[in-house]
Image (tube, coloured by chain):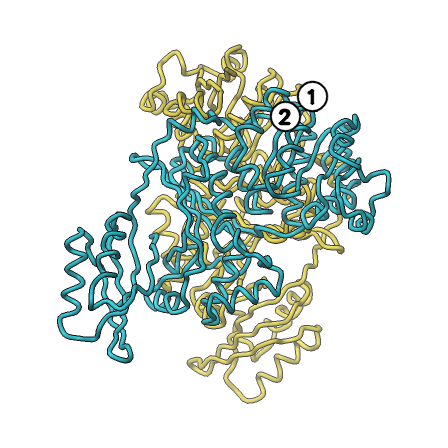
Chain colours: A cyan, B yellow
Amino acid sequence: MKKAGVAILGLGVVGGGTYKILTEKKEFFKKTQGVDITVECALEKNIERAKALGLSDSMIAANIEEVVSNPAVDIVVEVMGGVEPARTFVLKALMSGKSVVTSNKELFAKHWPELEAEAKKMNVGLFFEATCVGGVPIIRVLQESMQANEIKSIMGIINGTTNYILTKMANEGSSYEEALKEAQKLGYAEFNPTADVEGFDATYKLSILSSLAFNTKIYIDNVYREGITGVKAEDIAYGKEMGYTLKLLGIGKNTEKGVEVRVHPTFIKNDNPLASVNDSFNAVHIVGDSVGDIMLYGRGAGSLPTGSAIVSDIIFAAKHAEYFYSCFDNSEKGAKATRFVSDFKSKYYLRLIVKDAAGVLSEFTGVFAKNGISIEQVKQIAGKGGSAEVVIVTHDSKESAITKTLKKLAGMDIIKAIGGCIRIEE
Amino acid sequence: MKKAGVAILGLGVVGGGTYKILTEKKEFFKKTQGVDITVECALEKNIERAKALGLSDSMIAANIEEVVSNPAVDIVVEVMGGVEPARTFVLKALMSGKSVVTSNKELFAKHWPELEAEAKKMNVGLFFEATCVGGVPIIRVLQESMQANEIKSIMGIINGTTNYILTKMANEGSSYEEALKEAQKLGYAEFNPTADVEGFDATYKLSILSSLAFNTKIYIDNVYREGITGVKAEDIAYGKEMGYTLKLLGIGKNTEKGVEVRVHPTFIKNDNPLASVNDSFNAVHIVGDSVGDIMLYGRGAGSLPTGSAIVSDIIFAAKHAEYFYSCFDNSEKGAKATRFVSDFKSKYYLRLIVKDAAGVLSEFTGVFAKNGISIEQVKQIAGKGGSAEVVIVTHDSKESAITKTLKKLAGMDIIKAIGGCIRIEE
């Protein structure tokens, strides 16, 4: 029977879940997978936390050198999060001939080429299923099941915190602030929620997923990013009336014009399968030229779901002597060859607060026409105090044309405010 | 660069799609996968069909011996369907040291242990992603992504033909016969639709999927099977009113009492994600003890979607010198150790045509009580000619108790007919 020794760097939520699965299911894995996996040691400053999980004193390493010099360790699991010292530790593990399994999306999105180059040089494995969408096996599916496809698009709800907040706003009409507070109370959002609500977390994931989907390194700087902090409950409500559901989507497209990658609040039709993915669930929809549409759905975070992804990588690593790396030129040089669409097109939902007076509609719609934006729907909503709200849905329009139009509108006397501006994906 | 020579047995819908992908994307696979795949030959009686696809005369093999003795062939793709001669051909390929990729669910469900034993003996690969649910990568997900889980249940819409028919019946109120005719006209159902509509196809797939999910060989004889030929449009309509959608489901459960595997028409709640999987789309919902709920969705059949699954197996096979087989004791001996639940429990929807007379309700509900079946809902629908229709939803009841009750009811004067009997899964 194949044997594998594991070291875990960090015994937080994910590290704890991983330790629990590996120890409780040791016999199960021997029986069903033919591999005998032993947790040899862990690196964790909080000794009490380590002991509470059941680790003996001798299993708690003093420093990274002790871990990487341990000949019983074959696979190092990095679940610390953040760039440093995680990057240094992972590089040391690879240089010492250990395979690495990581859940660290920030590290991976920012330093993948460097880590992969080191892994290749040492001929060891580098696994990262847990970096994206927790228990949903999206990385392995992209790597081992979609090879026959040129992937046209990848679109998904890849952040559970924001999906919980938007679901709550939609179902209960709560404001962003109220929904965030509730999410924090339930542990779905952190005390400092910036990484989630400003879309950084989704950007890291989209960078990794679209790199695999489009066979070229997509840097996070290539990803357009917009969070949900500006989302208003009334826009969700108006959208609902028009048949739309609001989601924070990660969107990657590969068209003849180039690659387009973006994270932003997006209206999708209510009958889009992603529209019914609620609360902290995640889902990714892929279109391949051979397979057509596929969708994967599951829990994007949490101790055991993410632990499940990590353990699947550990078992995969334990069974395969050699790992097959990403299939594309994952270097800066490779990335430079990629053409990006920056001025991307989409439909837009806009809400304007206007003066309630005759001729106003014709005046501001003229600005749209001048900028080449064609309007699909206009809906006027009775306002108060001499104001009216107007909701506009445009046909496909260039980002630059919308920006120009909004700037012009903002300077007009008849426009009191731009209430909302949300892209629509159909 | 790794090279692989491929032979295709059968150039029908799936074989043709596979050939098309392999030849059109040869350069793409070299670039993105680092493998150079060449179709060396094919076995196809219909020479015109082979030539129409672009095969030269010299590529069309005269017989299986010519294929398996060809040293340029590393991987044999069997996409003929049916048990014989496919079984003999696959065995010959394995015995000649070729890896095999197959889409043949009937062959695989019936002869998996024999094929796997031969592959192991020869140390070659045996891949079968395309046997189940076409382009949805369910096999690889079960094998390579769910290892950390004891799988509690697997439940899915795993036959596109019947899903198309049931969707049509639900949306348009058509009868089974009308919907089948339409499906045949569109090529979704075969001229002889038995394999699909009687649930054999789903049974083959469920046998394979539940074997992988529960780590033991589940023979097709272990699967309870009931097709959709008896489904009435009025039951779909009554169910809809009660918040249920009718689907032909493959259901596998692993409980403390044992394994339970069944294929039958099933009412599920309208908000179950499987309820909105329509037309010829397929989806599989899995519950693992670590990962929780995951769902995979996509096209279950078709030339290119199934071709996509086959090509992913070919590339996987080309990259891995050694293949890792199913992780459990896939033998008759292993299978014998499995405990099955045969008298399974579920909620039931029943429709009775009864005499429209006083005291009737109390008389027949008494039969339910006597057999220990507790009733959740009763709804009487005005009938005609002295009859009434009564729709009953039971609480969880044993299969045997329902059978006994229906037998008793059928013999009663007040019961004119048992209109419908459909299990409910919640």
From the image, tell me which residue sits under label 1.
B121
The residue lying at 48 percent from left, 72 percent from top is: A172
Please say whether residue B285 is visible from this viewpoint.
Answer: no
Closer to viewer: mark 1 or mark 2: 2
The residue lying at 14 percent from left, 74 percent from top is: A358
The residue lying at 41 percent from left, 62 percent from top is: A231
Q: Amino acid at mark 1?
A: Lys
Of pointers 1 and 2, the one earlier in the residue sequence = 1
Point out the residue furthest to the right here: A57
Q: Position of residue A307 (x, y in %)?
A: 67, 45
SS at mark 2 in the image: loop
Left or right of B345 on screen, residue B52: left
Give the distance between the C-alpha atoms of the residues marked 1 and 2, in whole angstroms: 12 Å
The residue lying at 50 percent from left, 11 percent from top is: B72
The crowding category of the residue bearing disc 2, from other C-alpha atoms within 10 Å (few below 14, some 14 to 19, many at least 20), is some
Residue A383 lies in quadrant? bottom left
From the image, tell me which residue sits under label 2.
B323
Query: Is the same chain shared between marks 1 and 2?
Result: yes
SS at mark 1 in the image: helix
Question: Chain ID for label 2?
Answer: B
Q: Position of residue A263 (x, y in %)?
A: 42, 48
Left or right of B15 on screen, residue B395: right
